[in-house]
Image: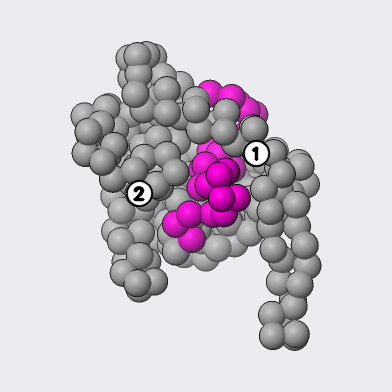
Amino acid sequence: MPDGSLSLPARLYLLAWDTGRLKITGTARLHLLVRAGALTELAQRGLLVDDDGIAVPVGLDESTGDPVLDGLLELVQESRPRRWKTWVTLHARTTLDAVREQLAAEGFLSAERRRVLGVLPSLDYALERVAAVDALREGARRVLEGPLPAAEVPERDAAVVALAAAAELRTLVPAKDRRRHKARIDELTDRSGAAAPALRRVVREVNAAVIVAATAAATAAG
């Protein structure tokens, strides 16, 4: 998949952009998807492990060098023990804000300051590297549709599609495709945690939490 240097949460955020309309889709659940991506990558890297459903950091001095992932890792390290599904939603917008800042610094986005009601400061983000996002989406679609067997797909690439499907990200996996590719999505979900049975359980728990939280967010938005 192109832009292999991008973290899983960064990829998922970029894939939420509709590059035809230059707008973000699924705004009610985007923070949940981005947070789930960060949790999954930390688990894939072995920096968060599972202890009977609890997300546990492996040490207090570990880091990834990625500010988004390290910010979440530090939050988990400094907080009381919580379940994976709790971390999908708890302070999730802080991870989304960090991803936006990172992508703006790297030139994928531009940021413009404005004031809401003339008082509250806010930032508007615009997509700058449209071709890069189109290439990222094309690569993710190839992962979804094959022909590469799921067992040969890199774990991070598999997680992109599995999480996007769980969050019903229309720009990558429309509803009709989720039904048509259900078996493939299940295979990619398992591949996301291929390193160990415990990691597979974590990925499935995070995916399930995304589905529940995203459904609740969409209902509230509606």
Looking at the image, the residue that sits furthest to the front is 20
Label 1 close to label 2 by CB (< 8 Å) = no
In percent of the image, x 76 and y 42: which residue is there? 107
- Is residue 57 visible in the rendered structure shown here? no
The earlier-in-sequence mark between 1 and 2 is 1
In percent of the image, x 35 and y 59: which residue is there? 214
- Residue 19 forms part of the magenta stretch: yes
Magenta range is 1-27
In percent of the image, x 50 and y 27: which residue is there? 138
The label on residue 54 is none
Check the image and tell me how it is coloured.
one colour
The residue carrying mark 2 is: 168
Task: Give the x, y percent position of residue 117.
Answer: 69, 85
Distance from disc 1 to disc 2, alpha carbons, whole Å, reads 22 Å
The residue carrying mark 1 is: 130
| 180 to the left or right of 29 | left
Task: Give the x, y percent position of residue 88.
Answer: 42, 56
Task: Give the x, y percent position of residue 1.
Answer: 53, 23
Relative to 149, residue 47 above or below: below
Identify residue type, mark 1.
Val
Asked which secondary structure carries label 1, the reply is helix
Q: Nearer the viewer, residue 63 or 148?
A: 148
Relative to 146, residue 10 above or below: below
In percent of the image, x 57 and y 43: which residue is there? 19
Q: Nearer the viewer, residue 159 or 62?
A: 159
| 75 to the left or right of 208 | right
Relative to 123, residue 56 above or below: above
Q: Residues within 10 Å of mark 2 (few under 14, many from 20)?
A: many
Asked which secondary structure carries label 2, the reply is loop
Identify residue type, mark 2.
Glu
